[in-house]
Image (spheres, rainbow, N blue to C red):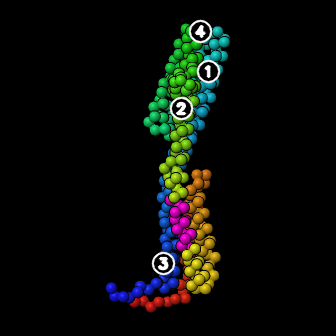
Amino acid sequence: MSGRRLRAPHPIVVLRWLRAGVLGVVVVTTLLYLVVDNRTGEQNAAADRTNAALGHIKEASKEAKAAKAALEAVARTRAMHLTGTGGDFANATASVSSHLTSAAEGNGAGEQGLSHIQFVQGQLATCVQMANTAVLDTQPGLTTALDALDDKPEYDGEHPIAFTGGLRRSLEDLEKLEATAHRHQLDSGWRSPGLLWPLFIGPTAVMLMLVCASGYLIAHRFRQYPSPAFAVALAAQTSISIAMCTRSYQPPAALALPALAAAGALAYLAYRPRLAEYRFPRS
């Protein structure tokens, strides 16, 4: 032991460390923003496609209801052997098929969703075949065709079993499946609040402590008022961090990057008057 006591660093050295820490936090926040913005952009695109698929499934359900009404209307004429299933039924079922094809392109439920879409498409083909057969079989065949369009599902106790009913019921089950996938897309991965809040609030808390320490040092050791630029820089960084943690609005790069650049510039300028008072010779 040399017996020499460690000397505390000069306040200006501490101030330089604090400045480096604040600027580092701004850089880290900027990098986090770029990564999260890129990843959430991909998830948002997938969620938008799933939302569009949901719209097509809802339209398919409306057309399936119209197909049932058209088949019932033809049946009331008691001339199915002359008129066939009618143009309205053919147009409605063709529209259901078209919407299902479009829904498959935006499917968000993975292999399970694709499998069920194909199952519903098979149900649709069966319904059309039964309706065409009913033209020759009259009432018995017609009842079977209408059941295929709107039959009730099987039950497991008090709960209906998905995809065991008619075409319209299967479309409702498919809508629920895709809606669940859509909610998962909005709440998971890089859009999960459980990930985003610690990711962005952590650096904000560090910057708050560094700014408070800087203000205390300037006020008590340098006998000066801290620059208002400290508060503005902290506010700019905090606003972007909090906005990135929300699902409703995440700022675009055209807004976030200039705000973070301004936070860094203001932080640098806030320290400059005090640091400029001291010029240490280079060793």
Q: Secondary structure at mark 3?
A: helix
The label on residue 68 is: 1
Q: How far apart are the two marked residues, 4 and 3, measured between alpha carbons? A: 88 Å
Mark 1 crowdedness (10 Å alpha carbons): few <14, some 14-19, many ≥20: many
Q: Secondary structure at mark 4?
A: helix
Q: Nearer the viewer, mark 2 or mark 1?
A: 2
Q: Nearer the viewer, residue 23 or 10?
A: 10
Q: Sequence order check: which comes first, mark 1 or mark 3?
A: 3
Residue range in magenta is 199-211
Q: Secondary structure at mark 2?
A: helix
Q: Sequence order check: which comes first, mark 2 or mark 1?
A: 1
Q: Position of residue 166 (x, y in %)?
A: 55, 22
Q: Sequence order check: which comes first, mark 2 or mark 3?
A: 3
Q: Position of residue 136 (x, y in %)?
A: 55, 9
In which quadrant will I find the N terminus? bottom left
Q: How far apart are the two marked residues, 1 and 3, measured between alpha carbons? A: 75 Å
Q: Nearer the viewer, residue 179 or 207?
A: 207
Q: Position of residue 148 (x, y in %)?
A: 55, 19
Question: Total label count?
Answer: 4
Which residue is under mark 3?
17
Q: How far apart are the two marked residues, 1 and 4, measured between alpha carbons? A: 15 Å
Q: Sequence order check: which comes first, mark 2 or mark 4?
A: 4
Give the answer, above or below, for where 152 lies relative to 227.
above
Note whether residue 94 is visible.
Answer: no
The label on residue 174 is: 2
Q: Residue at x 50, y 54 (%)?
A: 195
